[in-house]
Image (tube, rainbow, N blue to C red):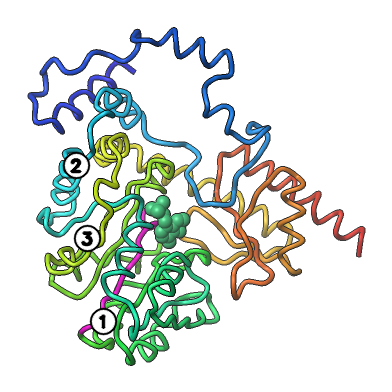
Amino acid sequence: MASSLQFSRRTFAHMLGLGAGAALLAPVAGRGMEEHIALRARGRYWPAKLLPKDPKNLVLLNSNENPYGPSPTAREAMIEAHEVACRYPDFYADKLQEKLAAFHGFAPENVVVTCGSTELLKMCAAAFLGPGKRLVQATPTFEALAAYARRGGAEVVKVPVDGDYRHNLDALARAAQERPGLVYICNPNNPTGTVVSRPAIEKFLDKVPRETVVLVDEAYHHYVEDPGYGTLLGAVEVGRNVVIARTFSKIYGMAGLRIGYGLASRALVKKLRREVVFSSANVLGCVAAYASLEDEGFVRQNQQRNQDARNFLVQSMRARGRSVIPSHTNFVCVHVARPVRPVIRAFREQGIRVGRPFAGLPEHIRVSLGLPEEMEKFVAAFDRVFAAATRAA
Ligand SMILES: Cc1ncc(COP(=O)(O)O)c(C=O)c1O
């Protein structure tokens, strides 16, 4: 603990432009801590009040979160940052922007920091769509962008995934020929968990009209094991009309802290910046993201945890005669061979939340990967849900 605290102070000092050994901020522990503990004991601490009634027994496998939470260094950095939570976040967002640029080998002008990657998706709809323009995307895929596009008056064209639940890139390219606006490629795709290879997307880029912007959402890229997969950062490097969306909500375990970012050419980032909500990236999220980026060990550890949970789930389902869609993410779609709504409800009654129903997947449930004990609870509940369904049949 002591060494990670020192490390985080260095990180935070670095962010503030101070020397590594600079006397920083007074430690938070010991400052009003008794008061906080007393408030908590009296039930006055609002987070406890707002938690679901029985959080310990509720298993949340519905939103593709990372149950391990932020890295220890990120947590320590956030404790330090409480001291500056009274300040607007722009300085910290700028530092994070510089850090992300250096991390990816770009200039800061190629990066925009956002309130989760959802804000970036909304910004893309505002910057590149509107009446008379077309959003082309797969179905099923992550739906937030389509909702924003429709609200802005754009046409939304949905192209069904192929027989292997992958993006049908040829059909997407054909649909993109008219009213060029934006194409959304979610890679890996949510909710299917599938990937398309980097060469396939590069070929696709040559087929869409020049003025079309291609938004590649790489929220789950850390989880991919397929050797054919690759980030599209290279396409940004050579100046293609590509925006890459990334997030700290998944491998970095920070979904509640709302930090995402986009990478694109200077010209595209300039257009995107016009649509950003001023000061939308919060101070705690910025320092946690900054500290997490340096924490490669934490990323590797989470990759391993995810792989273990995925293997356990897939093997458990196969042992029960169930097929799954091969997943490159932190969730898996399981074929339940019956309409999905009652199955989702049945899991809920067992205290387990799985994903909502998705277009094109009428008989699959999407199960996010949780802690080992949560995966065991899921499998036990699976047996109860299907034993009950078999008895009822
Ligand atoms: C593919 C994809 N993109 C973007 C998001 C939004 O994530 P956030 O706004 O937390 O970065 C999600 C959330 O689950 C997602 O699955």
Residue 269 versus residue 370 in the image, above or below: below
Which residue has dot 3 on it?
263
Identify which residue is drawn at 36% across, 33% down. Answer: 71
Q: Position of residue 301 (x, y in %)?
A: 40, 39
Q: Amino acid at mark 1?
A: Thr
Q: Which residue is mark 2?
A: 90
Q: Is residue 217 magenta?
A: yes
Specify whether 313 is left or right of 231.
Answer: right
Res 223 visible: no
Locate residue 99: give its quadrant.
Answer: top left
Q: Quadrant of the C terminus?
A: bottom right
Taking depth in this image into account, of 360 and 93 the one nearest to the observer is 93
Q: Total marks drawn?
A: 3
Q: Secondary structure at mark 2?
A: helix
The amino acid on which the numbered mark 2 sits, given as a three-letter code, is Asp
The x, y position of residue 57, in whole percent, is 68, 34
Mark 2 and mark 3 residues within 8 Å of each other at the beta carbon: no
Q: Is residue 12 left or right of residue 44?
A: left
Task: Give the vertical position of 74 relative to 23 (above or below).
Answer: below
Q: Which residues are magenta?
A: 211-222
Would you name the residue on which mark 1 appears? 212
Answer with mark 3 or mark 1, whichever residue precedes in sequence: 1
